[in-house]
């Protein structure tokens, strides 16, 4: 396992992206539990890659949710519902991952849903150059519906109890503490435990980033 600074971690990830040799855009998954730091890492990686002249597409699983009325058939705090009923993988594959893949025409959309307004979106189609990089962050990205569609798989690992503490800080202005705690302990953490039990995402990752201390991360590269 390697330890280093944030910049050293980003340098390692940039090298990993650069080592991918395909004739279509490079699709990078940044997976991990809620509040593990995966979105921040994805944003930072995108900035560095753009600074090196790469065409970067940034997208997130939060823009591929089912509408709220469809997300909670098992209840708002159901861990099984979080894992099985939340994300529209068919749409994600159809409008983004497959068009950027080896058989795709590189004409994509990077969203189908607006979480703020709970509205279905249909943004204009964009054409990606063949050497573009998709940096996609979200939960459950290494599950069977998606596992074969990434050229690089990164898992951001953080102790689940740490994610609760981060969520309480991050969301304290928008949600009561009791609601945050309940959502994490009844829905989000058990859904991650279900994911680990059924999929074992770290076994499928190319790089596992240990992000309990974001400014002093550790990482390990896996072969698959």
Image (spheres, grey):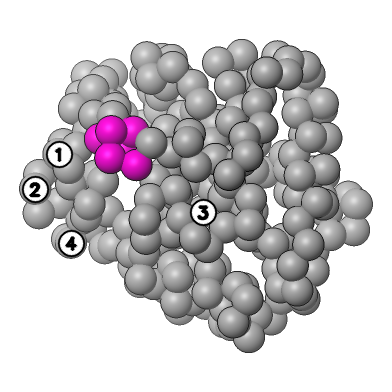
Can you tell which quarter of the image residue 118 is in? bottom left
Real-space CA distance between mark 4 and mark 1, rounded to the nearest whole angstrom: 13 Å
Which SS does the magenta portion mostly show?
Answer: helix
Circles 2 and 1, Cβ within 8 Å, touching? The answer is yes
Residue at the image point whose x is 71% and y is 73% from the top:
24
Rate crowding at label 1 as few (under 14), some (14 to 19) or many (20 or more) other CA atoms within 10 Å. Answer: some
Q: In the orientation shown, which residue stands out farthest toward the front? A: 224
First-in-chain label (2 vs 3): 3
First-in-chain label (4 vs 3): 3
- From the image, tell me which residue sits under label 1: 78
Circles 4 and 3, Cβ within 8 Å, touching? The answer is no
| 56 versus 29 height, above or below | below
In percent of width and height, residue 32 lies at 47, 36
Real-space CA distance between mark 2 and mark 3, rounded to the nearest whole angstrom: 24 Å
- From the image, tell me which residue sits under label 4: 70
Can you tell which quarter of the image residue 82 is in? top left
Circles 3 and 1, Cβ within 8 Å, touching? The answer is no
Mark 3 secondary-structure assignment: strand
- Which of the two discs, 4 and 2, sits closer to the camera? 2
| 83 versus 89 height, above or below | above
- From the image, tell me which residue sits under label 3: 60
Whether residue 138 is visible, yes or no, is: yes
| 81 versus 112 height, above or below | above
Q: Quadrant of the C terminus?
A: top right
- From the image, tell me which residue sits under label 2: 74
Rate crowding at label 2 as few (under 14), some (14 to 19) or many (20 or more) other CA atoms within 10 Å. Answer: few
Real-space CA distance between mark 4 and mark 3, rounded to the nearest whole angstrom: 19 Å
Which region of the structure is painted magenta?
A: 194-199
């Amino acid at each position: 396992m390697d330890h280093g600074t944030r910049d050293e971690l980003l340098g390692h990830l940039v090298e990993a992206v650069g080592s991918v040799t395909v004739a279509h855009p490079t699709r990078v998954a940044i997976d991990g539990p809620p509040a593990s730091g995966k979105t921040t890492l994805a944003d930072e990686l995108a900035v560095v890659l753009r600074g090196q002249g790469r065409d970067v597409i940034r997208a997130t699983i939060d823009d591929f949710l089912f509408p709220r009325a469809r997300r909670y058939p098992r209840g708002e705090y159901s861990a099984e519902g979080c894992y099985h009923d939340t994300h529209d993988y068919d749409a994600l594959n159809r409008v983004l991952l497959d068009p950027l893949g080896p058989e795709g025409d590189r004409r994509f959309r990077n969203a189908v849903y607006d979480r703020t307004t709970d509205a279905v979106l249909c943004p204009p189609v964009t054409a990606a150059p063949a050497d573009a990089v998709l940096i996609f962050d979200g939960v459950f990205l290494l599950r069977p519906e998606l596992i074969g569609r990434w050229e690089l798989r990164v898992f951001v690992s953080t102790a689940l109890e740490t994610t609760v503490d981060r969520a309480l800080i991050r969301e304290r202005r928008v949600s009561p503490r009791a609601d945050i705690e309940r959502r994490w302990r009844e829905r989000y953490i058990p859904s991650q435990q279900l994911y680990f039990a059924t999929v074992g995402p770290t076994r499928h990752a190319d790089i596992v980033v240990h992000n309990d201390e974001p400014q002093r991360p550790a990482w390990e590269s896996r072969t698959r």
